[in-house]
Image (cartoon, rainbow, N blue to C red):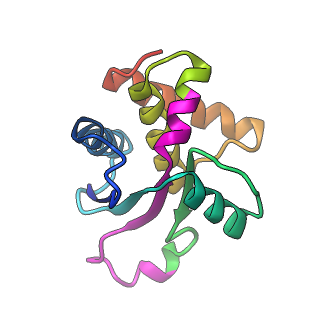
Amino acid sequence: MDLELYDDQKRLSAEHTKLVKELVEFAAKTLDKAPDTEMSITIVDDAEINRINKEYRDTDRVTDVISFAIEDGDEEVLSGFPDMPENIGDLFIDPDQVARQATTYEHSFERELGYTVVHGFLHLNGYDHIKPEDEAVMIPLQEKILTAYGLTR
């Protein structure tokens, strides 16, 4: 997995940055993604995630993660370029909101960060939870990945 992680303000510790990278790699292997699959994660603060949420989702509030899938629905166009790596998209994660949620749900920051990363990663890979039948697939897969990695509740 080719992951670019941008944390210009150094909002994550070295340990948490390592966790994010390892978890993305682990989730990618679980989904049998090609080793050259590309994505990015940008670490932002409350103000920036609120701005992105308002601009792109018309929702004026802070959230933990926002995902932007790049190739969503473009498989036919890309089939003419078999050597081109798949770029699944971009995640924006707010560690301050992740920390607040960890407190609310009474588990560790690491567990909540892992949940957020895997949740966003699955969205970039076409999973969703809006319809009950989709949620019945996505959420158990998310828990399977987190548990297998060692991030249990």
Q: Residue at x 46, y 48 (%)?
A: 121
Percent position of residue 122, x then y: 50, 46
Q: In the image, residue 47 lies at what x, y percent?
A: 59, 57
Which residue is at a point 71% across and 63% down the rendered structure image? 54
- Choose top left, top right, bottom left or bottom right for residue 79: bottom left
Position of the N terminus by quadrant = bottom left
Q: Magenta part of the protein: which range?
A: 77-101
Q: Residue at x 31, y 61 (%)?
A: 37
Work out whether 17 lies above or below 2.
above
Determine the residue positioned at 53% across, 64% down: 69
Q: To which quarter of the image does residue 135 belong?
A: top right
| In the foreground, 32 or 45 | 45
Q: Position of residue 13 (x, y in %)?
A: 28, 40
- Nearest the viewer among 67 and 11 is 11
Mark yes or no: residue 58 visible: yes
Task: Give x and y (percent) for residue 120.
Answer: 51, 48
124 within the magenta span: no
**Left or right: residue 135 compared with residue 142:** right
